[in-house]
Image (cartoon, rainbow, N blue to C red):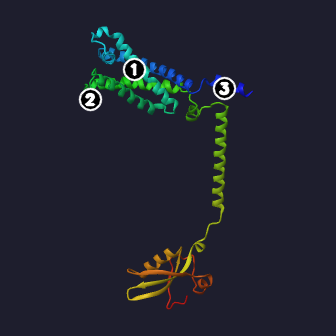
């Protein structure tokens, strides 16, 4: 039974990574061909409007790569088309690989556009068949960029539509196989449970009685040193010891220094008639009786 299941899995999923790579390559070539077709159609429409002649730079580049002797452009039409279509089709699998790995949409196609431009300029300038783009006339720069953008975005659109990697269901939110749907359902349930738990905790925190100002404050005995009169005892209502020292020093004026020596207990608070709700209250004592 187990052997039958393994054989069934192999038939369903091919031979593993090699089958996936071959499928990615094939679909990438199709996407690249679609991009070149769209770019070629746009070029012919543009040439009919602007009167721009055909460019034979692709043929010159391929000739130099292959080490062939020079020939007139009219005899290089086939080589020109081969380089024109070949480059675009050959780069298609890279865009498909991007889509298979989750890099999709307009941003991925924009990155792919830069890759296409880099490929063209690297080959043309390395072989000496072309010139750096910044030396071209401005209108030629715009036309080339427009056509290569059409190629890149059409290739990307087709590649994104044909991407079949399992990650696609997670990136696009589409239903996958039974295991993917079950895992997604469990994730939703876990997130819902966590949300309910946080909501209950928040409600519990809101319903818990808040500390009153009296419970939040404390009474402290503080010794204050001022110029000409060191060690003046005061009683301070504050949140904590640091707060008490700051309040006492502020009340005593500039150049004063305050230091808490201890916190008062409930009996001492009642004895001195202190109100813990009155934070910032500072009372001076004639003598230290704490």
Q: Between marks 1 and 3, how big is the CA–CA gap?
A: 37 Å
Percent coordinates x, y for residue 255 in the rendering: 38, 80
Tell us which disc is closer to us: 2 or 1.
Answer: 1
Front-lying residue, 169 or 124: 124
Residue that protrudes farthest toward the front in the picture:
3
Q: How many numbered circles does the render carry?
A: 3
Mark 3 neighbour density, 10 Å: few (under 14) some (14–19) many (20 or more): few
The residue tagged 2 is 134
Which image quarter is the C terminus in? Answer: bottom right
Earlier residue among tags 2 and 3: 3
Percent coordinates x, y for residue 20 in the rendering: 55, 25
The residue tagged 1 is 87
Q: What is the number of the mark on residue 278?
A: none
The residue tagged 3 is 9
Q: Residue at x 50, y 22 (%)?
A: 25
Tell us which disc is closer to us: 1 or 3.
Answer: 3
70 to 218, vertically: above or below: above
């Amino acid at each position: 039974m187990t052997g039958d299941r393994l054989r069934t899995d192999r038939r369903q999923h091919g031979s593993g990574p090699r089958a996936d790579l071959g499928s990615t390559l094939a679909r990438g070539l199709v996407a690249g061909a679609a991009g070149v077709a769209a770019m070629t159609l746009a070029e012919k429409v543009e040439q009919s409007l602007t009167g721009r002649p055909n460019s034979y730079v692709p043929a010159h580049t391929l000739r130099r790569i292959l080490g062939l002797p020079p020939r007139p452009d009219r005899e290089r039409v086939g080589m020109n088309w081969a380089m024109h279509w070949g480059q675009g089709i050959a780069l298609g699998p890279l865009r498909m690989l991007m889509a298979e790995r989750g890099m999709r949409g307009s941003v991925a196609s924009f990155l792919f556009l830069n890759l296409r431009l880099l490929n063209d300029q690297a080959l043309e300038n390395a072989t000496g068949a072309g010139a750096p783009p910044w030396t071209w006339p401005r209108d030629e720069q715009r036309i080339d960029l427009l056509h290569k953008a059409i190629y890149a975005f059409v290739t990307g659109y087709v590649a994104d539509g044909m991407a079949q990697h399992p990650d696609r269901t997670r990136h696009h939110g589409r239903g996958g196989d039974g295991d993917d749907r079950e895992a997604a359902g469990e994730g939703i349930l876990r997130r819902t449970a966590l949300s309910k738990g946080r909501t209950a905790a928040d409600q519990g925190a809101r319903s818990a009685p808040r500390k009153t100002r009296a419970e939040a404050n404390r009474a402290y005995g503080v010794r204050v040193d001022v110029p000409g009169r060191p060690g003046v005892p005061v009683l301070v209502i504050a949140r904590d010891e640091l707060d008490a020292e700051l309040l006492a020093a502020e009340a005593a004026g500039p150049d004063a220094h305050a230091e808490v020596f201890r916190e008062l207990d409930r009996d001492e608070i009642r004895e001195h008639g202190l109100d813990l709700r009155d934070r910032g209250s500072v009372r001076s004592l004639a003598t230290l009786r704490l």
